[in-house]
Amino acid sequence: MKQTLLIVFGLLTLMLVGCSGQTGSASLETMSQAEDDLKAAALPLAEEAERLFSDLVPARLAPQAESPRSLTLIQDSDGITLVASHSLWQPPEDPSVLGDRPLAVVIRCTSDGRRCAGYRGNLGGTEQEGYRITWYGGKDEGGRRLSRSVPAGLGWGGLCPPGQPHFSWKKWGMYYVFDGCQYFNPNRIAHLNAPFPSDLPGQDLSGTLDTTPFAERLRQVCCGLPKPFDVEWPPAILLREDVAVAFLPYQNPRLRQARSLEELVGEPLGIAYWRQAAGGATLTKADAARILEVKFTREDPDWILVATDLKDPSQTLKFRVGEVGWCDGCFGQDPPPGQPIPRYLGIEDRLQEPPMLHLQVGPLELRGIEKKDIRR
């Protein structure tokens, strides 16, 4: 009994210390393998979700085996979200009439990844009458499949990474928005977006997802680097084919004490792991990763995130923030003492520009984050 208590005490101590007193032992280059491992661990959930929605599959459809499954993974204070392309997606020859085609599966998991539920999104409608996504969830007591149909915006043309669709996910107030870019025949590109129904019960899945190996690898990389504050665990994570981001808020008292965004100007917000492919291409091992300290600043007329490379402080990047908001006391943004400060990540595709990131740290909302030259 005594030995068991000592083991439990030791594990709790490791959880509580965070980065205090630790030194980094892993190379930053090892993080790309951690990304791949986490995405590979998530794929079986998408496959299980497809199987459980097989009652909705028309007999005329067959899997499109030649295309790899597109996957977007986000973990933040709302748990874990996966958005994956459906293997039965078949673009129509005439995009003006979509019928009712399986487009994507969405999986929502608890923060520990032990309980997951699946959803399937079908894209349908016509150019004249408007488009829609029908989201299918679990079944009611009578065995009937529950669903919600929501309007979908569809814009033709623009940018889309070659070869496969990319899906986006962001939190917008109390709502979640699904969007992305999709190829149609003959090689027409469409950008689509639709709300995701938060009141639709999902289809229970037996699979689980453990993000701990990724977080632990990140801990080994960043803990030994000099920084003004310890960080709060676990990280917020966003992984997609073209971008990989993780964010750890600082234990900066100002993040909890501030009552307006002006009080956070000049303050360091936390540490970001950042890796992005140029031009929306697929990430490769050649795309360098960085560990950045992120500071919130103002350079009129722009809101700016100044990102300093913690491994080489002489190197800095600037990210413009398109929209800054303050959400004091709403959506549970005032955590009890001892609880991690809420953090949210999102990504949004655009017609003519590269994708933008969204970050929320407590009440501070930063929408439309993009790396580009700041012109006066």
Image (cartoon, rainbow, N blue to C red):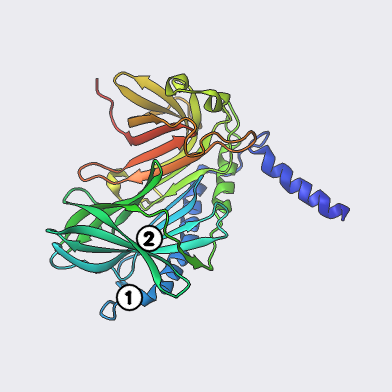
| Viewer-nearest of discs 1 and 2 | 1
Q: Residue 38 shows which numbered tag?
A: none
Image quadrant where one finds the C terminus = top left
The image position of residue 338, as x and y in percent, is 65, 35
Left or right placement of residue 275 versus residue 125 in this view: right
* Rendered residue at 19%/55% (across/down): 189
Relative to 282, is 228 above or below? above
The residue that mark 1 highlights is 57
Instruction: Residue 230 in the image: state x and y as whole percent.
Output: 60, 31
Q: From this viewpoint, which residue is outermost toward the right?
A: 2
Badge 1 crowding class, 10 Å Cα cut-off, few under 14, some 14 to 19, many 20 or more, is some
Amino acid on which the number 2 mark rests in the picture? Ala
Give me the residue at 45% from left, 61% from top.
201
Q: Please, what is the three-letter code of the amino acid marked with disc 1?
A: Val
Closer to the camera, 90 or 39? 90
Q: Which residue lies under the disc numbered 2? A: 84
